[in-house]
Amino acid sequence: MNIKVATGLDDCPPPPVHVSADGILWAEESIVNARKTKGDVLVGWTGFNDPKDNTWEPLENLRHLPLLLDSYFGKDKTPDE
C-alpha cells in the first residue's frame, strides 16, 4: 500500500468540532481584535489562515472558552473591563 501526502488542503474548510441539531459549529482558534464599545471580538478560526476568513462575533458567544478569553484579555481581567 502506497501512502500519498494530500496537497491543497489549505483551501478546504476544517472539519466541524461538533454537530448539533441547529447546524455545524467550528472551532475558534484565537481572538484577533476586540471592539469593547460594540461588545464583539474578531475571531480567527482553526484551519482558516486568511485574515478575510476572520469574523466578528458577539462576546457572549465565546463565554464558554475562558482560556481563549484569558489569553487575549488577560487572566485577571474580564472582557467587560
Image: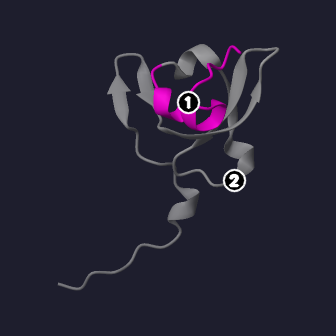
How many numbered badges does the structure rendering display? Answer: 2
Q: Could you tell me residue 19's position as x and y percent?
A: 35, 28
- Tell me the residue at 55%/30% (across/down): 75
Q: Residue lying farthest left? A: 1
Q: Could you tell me residue 27's position as x and y percent?
A: 47, 38
Mark 2 surroundings within 10 Å by alpha-carbon count, few (fewer than 14), some (14 through 19), many (20 or more): few
Marked residue nearer the N-terminal end (2 or 1): 2
Identify the residue under disc 2. Answer: 50
Quarter of the image holding residue 35? top right
Span highlighted in magenta in the image: 64-81
Quarter of the image holding residue 78? top right
Q: Nearer the viewer, residue 7 or 76?
A: 76
Comparing labels 2 and 1, the label whose residue is closer to the camera: 1
- The amino acid type, in three-letter code, at marker 1 is Lys
- The amino acid type, in three-letter code, at marker 2 is Asp
- Tell me the residue at 41%/45% (across/down): 15
Q: Could you tell me residue 76's position as x and y percent?
A: 58, 25
- Tell me the residue at 53%/68% (across/down): 8
Q: Secondary structure at mark 1?
A: loop
Quadrant of the frame with the C terminus: top right
Image position of 29 with respect to 74: above or below? below
Q: Residue lying farthest front? A: 76
- Tell me the residue at 68%/43% (across/down): 53
Q: Which mark is residue 75?
A: 1
Q: Which mark is residue 55?
A: none
